[in-house]
Amino acid sequence: MAAVEAGTRVKVTAPITVFHVPKTKGAPTLLTGCEGEVVKKIDESISAVQPFQVRVEVETEAGPVKVLAHFAEEEIEEA
């Protein structure tokens, strides 16, 4: 993948499940296939955080919701 920086549109390609999606009451939400925008690339080494912070839009029963999640480079591709 080319250099991914803030503002790049990306698609989630890995089977990533999150539990912090608003309006889902903590239910597991699969992000595979969701598209979004890289908000920040974290260059310093932080063990608990993947380097790409991405805002993706997820469909819920209550309608679309924007979610921030962290991804490794191999979990996303340019959209």
Image (cartoon, rainbow, N blue to C red):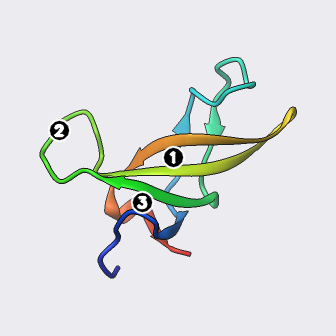
Q: Residue flagged by tag 3: what amino acid is it?
A: Glu
Is residue 59 left or right of 11 when viewed as pictured?
right
Circle 2 crowding by C-alpha within 10 Å: few under 14, some 14–19, many from 20: few
Q: Secondary structure at mark 1?
A: loop
The secondary element bearing badge 3 is classed as: helix
Q: Residue at x 29, y 77 (%)?
A: 3
Separation of residues labelled 2 and 3 (CA atoms): 17 Å
| Quadrant occupied by the N terminus | bottom left
| x, y percent for residue 62 | 86, 32
Q: Quadrant of residue 18?
A: top right
Cα distance in 3D space between marks 1 and 2: 19 Å
Dot label at residue 75 = 3
Q: Which mark is residue 61?
A: none
Amino acid at circle 1:
Ile
Mark 3 neighbour density, 10 Å: few (under 14) some (14–19) many (20 or more): some
Q: Which residue is tagged 2?
A: 46
Indicate the amino acid at tag 2: Ile
Q: In this rendering, would 24 be left or right of 44?
A: right
Q: CA distance from mark 3 to mark 1?
A: 8 Å
Instruction: Give the residue number, with chain letter if any, for mark 1.
Output: 16
Using the image, determine if residue 1 lies above or below residue 11: below
Residue at the (47%, 52%) spot, across then down: 54
